[in-house]
Image (tube, grey):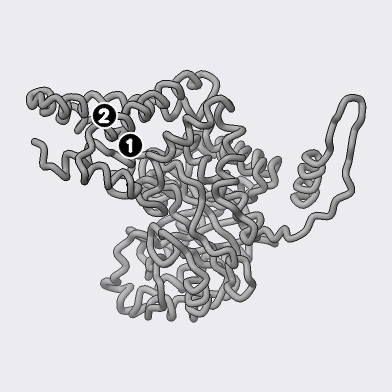
Amino acid sequence: MRGLRYANELLEKLIISKSEDIICPVATVIQDSPIQIRGVIEGFYGQPWSHKNRLNVIDYLGCHRMNTYMYAPKDDVYQRKEWRKLYPVNLQDEFSELQERCLQEQIDFYYMISPGNDICLSDDDDVSILCEKLQQMIDLGFTHFGLLFDDIDYHLKGRALVKFSTAANAHANLANQVNSYLKEKLSSYKLVICPTEYDNAEGTVYLSELTEKLAPEVMMFWTGPSTLASQISTYDLRVMAQVYQRKMIIWDNVPVNDFQNDAERLFLSPYRNRTPHINNDLYNVAGIVSNPMPEWESSKITIGTMSDYLWNPSRYRPQESFLSNLEDLIPKPLYSSFLLFASFNKNRFMQNDYQYDQINMINRNSVDEITNVLKNLMEVSIKLQTGVESSPLLKEMLPWLMRPAKDLELWNAIVVGNKNQVTYLKNRLASDHHRMGTDLVAKYIQKYSIQ
């Protein structure tokens, strides 16, 4: 059914309506080679998405030839901190609506659970409680699951240490019990686990033992050679395919902004720096899921371009995809303004925050050049504010669109040498939790130690 949908959507794009004629060209589609699992994982720290946002996420995925939504918000207490507790009726109703929307859009909904912080790995009662929680989701119609051991202390103690000796043995044992339970309850299901060591560039003792003892049909997550991978090369895939020895899903922490002070920023870059050979069967990549920002509308900048990459990695062109995906996000007259604003809000893990000429004009203390750049940025941000009512993306970006005017005010105080005003404005901006990634004023203050 997905294939039929994608074919129909492509056919609609090919058909040309001209005057009274309808033209349908004879065409052959070549070189489409989509990755099997394509989607997003709501796996960030911070305020989880609203139910309304999740419905929009599912609709968006369906319209962009993606097929997977994974539910794993770190701050859903029932998913992580209070994983033993069953979901109340109101949240069950929301899950049911999400599942229904996924069926409409041909999206696979993965429910993820994170018991690793306090589960007693040697206690059969705790395992039974975990399976009871999964049964609640099975009863709601879910057949795709994830068991997450990320971001936990995995040094065994007490009975667990005596029984299992190693964390890898304990994690494999729990995952295999969950896998057996799902196999007993469901005629068809999927299970993926996230190991505690998920961001390796090479093998480890933990990963070797885990993959050896884990049931072969269970997939494993990998975030790339680092937690926030600046690139994933063919070499990286070759190494980890040998380490995992099974199907892996890349949990790509892009464009997530929950690291350090990144929550104050927006990452508005296209998806890039991933090998075009990622779907070669040699590397066992079952799929890629993006971990977005809490700011879902802004995340569409990266997710939309990522959908093009996942559909055909070898023919993906980031900048072309970036431009074509703007059509559904902002009014066309604002394209050029948005591109300039986005260039000051790049994903710092994929691109440098500062261009060479920007660093150069700061090093040369070129006050006039810096002033002109800041004025231009303020002007385009004001122009973009005119589209707030018609564009959900620009509405979400509004606090960031207001920041350039504040930066220019501080810059003008620096230029005229008003030390009291500089101190006041610096202190005021310190409490502003919305800032540019390419912050020329802050870079200048740092360079010249302005108090």
| Residue 96 appears in the rendering | no
In screen coordinates, is 408 left or right of 9? left
Relative to the observer, which residue lies in front, 370 or 68? 370
- Crowd tier of the residue under label 2, counting other residues whose Cα lies within 10 Å: few below 14, some 14–19, many 20 or above: many
- Crowd tier of the residue under label 1, counting other residues whose Cα lies within 10 Å: few below 14, some 14–19, many 20 or above: many
Relative to the observer, which residue lies in front, 41 or 327? 327
In screen coordinates, is 69 left or right of 85? right
Q: Which mark is residue 436?
A: 1
Q: Which residue is mark 2?
A: 407
Q: Which mark is residue 396?
A: none
Do labels 2 and 1 touch, CB within 8 Å?
A: yes
Q: Earlier in the sequence, mark 2 or mark 1?
A: 2
**Residue 299 in picture, x, y percent from top left:** 48, 41
The image quadrant of residue 103 is top right
**Quadrant of the snapshot with the C terminus:** top left
Tag 2, which secondary structure? helix
- Identify residue type, mark 1: Met
**Residue 161 in picture, x, y percent from top left:** 30, 76
- Identify residue type, mark 2: Asp
| Residue 441 appears in the rendering | yes
Q: Residue at x 40, y 44 (%)?
A: 346
**Residue 185 in picture, x, y percent from top left:** 63, 60
Q: Residue at x 57, y 40 (%)?
A: 323
Relative to the observer, which residue lies in front, 16 or 232? 16
In screen coordinates, is 319 left or right of 379? right
Tag 1, which secondary structure? loop
In screen coordinates, is 419 left or right of 31? left
